[in-house]
Image (cartoon, rainbow, N blue to C red):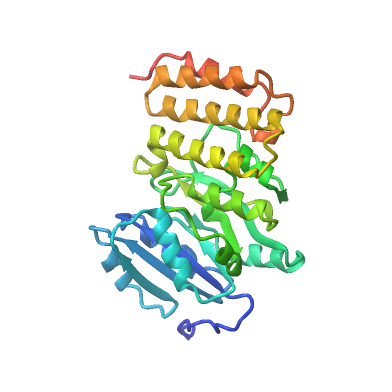
């Protein structure tokens, strides 16, 4: 006997989740992302696919899915932040989860997160899990970068130091977005980090489950591959956090560390983009701002991480 067809979740279910997938010309990855949502062991969900003006087969991919939990929303191309905001406006359920169109979840992702929410107090607005990288084909990707996830509460200081976790592993109580004004549409990257800084600065608590339950795809089309744009947006997010006093502006050592790790990561993105001279310049800026990290785990890096990067930067360019 075939299982019954899925039905729309009860909008009054306090554990129902609206899943927002923004999509722009990712039709080749989209079926895997959608399947990972519809295959969740937590059944009370709706999926809002926000097509941000795609010119590929995104509409046809969604039209081929006969599942009443899926809603297709089209808009003129306006960027990732605007697409997420469209999903937020259309969301019907108490919780909202975000999944990028090229990423995936394990079948237990939502069940794991909702079970954790049930153990936390109401002031915890966000719960996220760890992540695992995968390659273009969806296979686990080998990486030499340190990216440890530990089960604990994350604070505004954590988000000012490092963008972790990533948006595809986060579930949020929908009502907290009303006071935030949504994602900043002026940002073309780092918009998720900006949101978590604003929410936690307002007193909304954020919990991280160390178990990796989301897969983040790394491929040449990633928006994060544009190193100069990433630098500009991340620096804008950090500068505004400093201006707003997310962490006291008088805490100079903290902000020097925050910008030092920022320039270190900027050095890596420029190196990965083949911009080696810029990578060297930003590496030196990082060292000048804060010469020694005595507790590198606080910025999710291993001991002597900048010396390790230096050794990598000195390697001959691959042919």
Q: Nearer the viewer, residue 113 or 262?
A: 262
Tag count in the figure?
Answer: 0
Q: Quadrant of residue 77?
A: bottom left
Height in image: 43 above or below 222?
below
Q: Position of residue 257 (x, y in %)?
A: 65, 29
Which residue lies at the image location 48% right of the left edge and 63% below the top edge? 36
Q: Residue at x 53, y 53 (%)?
A: 167
Q: How far across and down, in percent of the image, does residue 231 sit? A: 45, 34
Quadrant for residue 309, please give it.
top right
Taking the image as shown, residue 291 lies to the left or right of residue 88, namely right
Q: Quadrant of the C terminus?
A: top left
Q: Position of residue 180 (x, y in %)?
A: 56, 60
Quarter where residue 119 is shown: bottom right
Which residue is farthest left?
55
Give the residue displayed 35% in from the left and 71% down from the top.
Answer: 72
Q: Is residue 109 visible?
A: no
Residue 179 visible at all:
yes
Q: What residue is rendered at 42% in x and 20% in y?
A: 278
**70 relative to 206 in the view: left or right:** left
Q: Relative to 70, is 235 on the left or the right?
A: right
Q: Between residues 149 and 140, which one lies in front from this camera angle? A: 149
Q: Is 149 placed above or below 23 here?
A: above
Residue 306, image x, y percentages: 59, 21
């Amino acid at each position: 006997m075939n299982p019954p067809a899925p039905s729309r979740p009860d909008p009054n279910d306090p554990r129902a989740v609206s899943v927002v997938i923004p999509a722009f010309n990712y039709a080749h990855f989209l079926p895997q992302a959608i399947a990972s949502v519809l295959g969740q062991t937590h059944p009370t969900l709706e999926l809002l696919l926000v097509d941000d003006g795609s010119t590929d087969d995104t509409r046809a991919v969604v039209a081929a899915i006969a599942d009443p939990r899926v809603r297709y929303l089209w808009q003129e191309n306006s960027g990732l932040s605007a697409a997420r905001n469209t999903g937020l406006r259309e969301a019907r359920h108490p919780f909202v989860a975000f999944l990028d169109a090229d990423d995936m979840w394990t079948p237990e992702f939502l069940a794991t997160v909702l079970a954790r929410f049930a153990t936390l107090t109401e002031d915890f607005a966000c719960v996220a899990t760890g992540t695992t990288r995968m390659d273009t084909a969806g296979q686990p990707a080998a990486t030499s970068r340190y990216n440890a996830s530990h089960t604990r509460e994350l604070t505004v200081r954590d988000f000012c130091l490092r963008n972790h976790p990533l948006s595809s592993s986060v579930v949020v109580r929908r009502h907290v977005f009303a006071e935030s004004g949504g994602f900043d549409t002026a940002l073309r990257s780092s918009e998720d980090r900006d949101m978590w800084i604003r929410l936690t600065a307002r007193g909304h608590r954020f919990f991280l489950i160390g178990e990796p339950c989301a897969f983040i795809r790394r491929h040449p089309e990633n928006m994060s591959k544009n190193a100069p744009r990433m630098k500009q947006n991340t620096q804008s997010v950090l500068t505004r956090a400093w201006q707003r006093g997310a962490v006291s502006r008088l805490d100079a050592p903290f902000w020097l560390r925050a910008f030092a790790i920022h320039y270190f990561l900027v050095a890596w993105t420029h190196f990965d983009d083949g911009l080696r001279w810029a990578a060297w310049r930003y590496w030196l800026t990082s060292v000048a701002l804060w010469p020694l990290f005595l507790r590198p785990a606080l910025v999710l890096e291993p001991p002597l991480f900048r010396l390790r990067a230096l050794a990598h930067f000195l390697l001959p360019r691959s042919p």
